[in-house]
Amino acid sequence: MRGPTAHGSVRLADVARHVGTSSQTISNALNHPERLTADLLERSLAGVEELGYRPNRSARTLRNQRSRLIGVRVEPPRPDRAALLLDQFLHALAASAAGLGYHLILAQAAGDTAELDAYEELRQTTTVDAFVLSGAHRDDPRAAWLRERGISFASFGRPWDTDLDPDDGSDAGSESPWVDVDGAAGVRAAVRHVAAQGHEEIAFLGWPEESDVGRDRRRGWAEACHELGLPARRQAGVVDEFEAGRDAAHRLLHPRRGGPVPTAVVCASDTLALGVLRTLSELGLRAGADVAVTGFDNTPTAALTTPGLTSLEQPLAAIAAELLRLVDSQLRGDVPGSSGDAHTLLAPTLVVRGSSTR
Amino acid sequence: MRGPTAHGSVRLADVARHVGTSSQTISNALNHPERLTADLLERSLAGVEELGYRPNRSARTLRNQRSRLIGVRVEPPRPDRAALLLDQFLHALAASAAGLGYHLILAQAAGDTAELDAYEELRQTTTVDAFVLSGAHRDDPRAAWLRERGISFASFGRPWDTDLDPDDGSDAGSESPWVDVDGAAGVRAAVRHVAAQGHEEIAFLGWPEESDVGRDRRRGWAEACHELGLPARRQAGVVDEFEAGRDAAHRLLHPRRGGPVPTAVVCASDTLALGVLRTLSELGLRAGADVAVTGFDNTPTAALTTPGLTSLEQPLAAIAAELLRLVDSQLRGDVPGSSGDAHTLLAPTLVVRGSSTR
């Protein structure tokens, strides 16, 4: 067994030993994350990060002359939202990038147009190999802009135009490589959980009709209620802000003539769910004991509020690893053969806390 | 008055009109933030960000040939802490960097040694002009490493060795340019606030003795109690984790023989304060009405928990602007004449919410 190199470099085998797996597994975690179970992938990437493993750069540099810089947008902070999900995503992306020998360069922008300006500026001033987008949406101008210029990219989030006429070959969205979270599956899990706690009148608090992500999550609620033989009667769609959630909860929990009052509120985000918790306190109701509440994103706030907020955790390490793999394979020239290969939907995991248990 | 340029560029005058101030003020916000009041600086930088203003790149590029890339570390996420302060700081830094025509490049690292490895790698593989450090501390190896290599940098946080023997010319820390928050002043403001609510037995929950930042904040508590003629009797120092705060609060609020029980707990972080709120709920006490609680950092959680957590907000936009100004002036060759010029201490602002009001 050789000792560490002159620079004290960590080798693949060191990481494998640390994690208690094989070098091939660690290599797969970095290059073919889809081959590993979510748990093994998380543990492998944690090991890569803890030991500070970096792939053999000279071998990679010989392979192609690249800047190995990947552009990613950061939005201005929003004090009215718990959703620092994209910050957590950025950490996961930075960890995966380091594992593959890439670095992230930040493009500060609010909105798609500003983002494209920022991309253009990065291209003019810096050699950027590729971009990782977040929040892909219908009629997203970014994918088209990048494709026109032949720039490699992958999106966190679906463009949502892939379910249009499947015979329409011009469907641009389906050509965009993306990784997304299965919001409907997540919300179904949340509804089943509160139903198992004995709740029969389960409301949904989500986003306005225009939101594709919101419709997907609401569909999960309606489907799960239907499967369980429960009514899917009360729901509201509001902007993703704390005060909007607080106001909507007052309306949802107000008795209507003849109608039963919901005893559970499944929400499309932690921000909305935290607004519901505030309303319960104002109404003298106890979260968990009187009304079950669940969120989505498992933001840091969910664990630290009282009672703790039950929420759906997105598998950010796996998402980031797959996005980097997609970008890396494009940059290495082996473009995925079918667009189907480049679309990955991952289910979130329900983390149960006091807000939904009696 | 000329119209927008061919690329639809936003000019300084457009930002000035948007904000309702002069072009000189906007220029100062970007180049001499210390000349503006905190409020005007915040509004000016918000305008720069909202309109997407970018300085005239060609003029800057002629001035010197630089990559205009600034390296900054991101840490792995910590699920047990509310302190996403450094994420919020990263957004502020990205906004200020964009305003001065710089881009941030992320170095993923956990701990100082991994951070220096990441810096070395960035230097070998990418042209990075400078680094912005965060969490400077006593015997910080990073400042010495960067100075030895003649690399420009500035730190968010003091090295804390500046108050050693002032005649010792070898004091390296004082030569490092830094911007920091006046923690003692912040905690003094929190103590005065809870005293004004009628509390007389005010406890402090902070960090272990080894923490310079923690000692500074605890000093603010002791000083304010002394000024107000109140006893500074009960305090605890624990690691900055939710469960540690929860446990410590049980001890602090447990009656001792003959001693009065605190009715207010001023904390060194939101994470600890959120742990205290959990304990109050477990003891059947109401935050605000029975026991006042304050945090530090004004993390997103502080606004969204119930009741809202009173907390000290760090002026991150001003801190980021000053750090970028320090780095920019080093890169332009006009190194600040005296080290005193390069040390800025800014006071945080108390944001009062339900956790500290009756």
Image (cartoon, coloured by chain):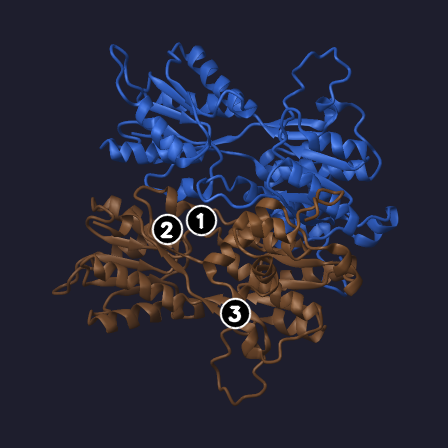
Chain colours: A blue, B brown
**Depth-wise, is mark 3 or mark 2 nearer the camera?**
3
- Amino acid beneath label 1: Asp
Which of A65 and B20 lies nearest the eye of the viewer?
A: B20
Closer-to-camera residue (A74/B39): B39
Q: Which mark is residue B137?
A: 3
Are circles 1 and 2 on residues that touch, CB within 8 Å?
yes
Q: Residues within 10 Å of mark 3 (few under 14, many from 20)?
A: some
In contact (CB < 8 Å): disc 3 and disc 1: no
Residue furthest front in the image: B1
Circle 1 is placed at which residue position? B80
Image quadrant in which the C terminus of chain A is located:
top left
- Secondary-structure class at tag 3: loop
Indicate the chain on which mark 1 is placed.
B
* Residue wearing tag 2: B243
Say if B35 sits above or below A214 in the image. below
Query: Between marks 3 and 2, how big is the CA–CA gap?
Result: 25 Å
Question: Do the residues marked 3 and 1 share a common chain?
Answer: yes
Point 62% across, 26% down: residue? A345
Q: Amino acid at mark 2?
A: Glu
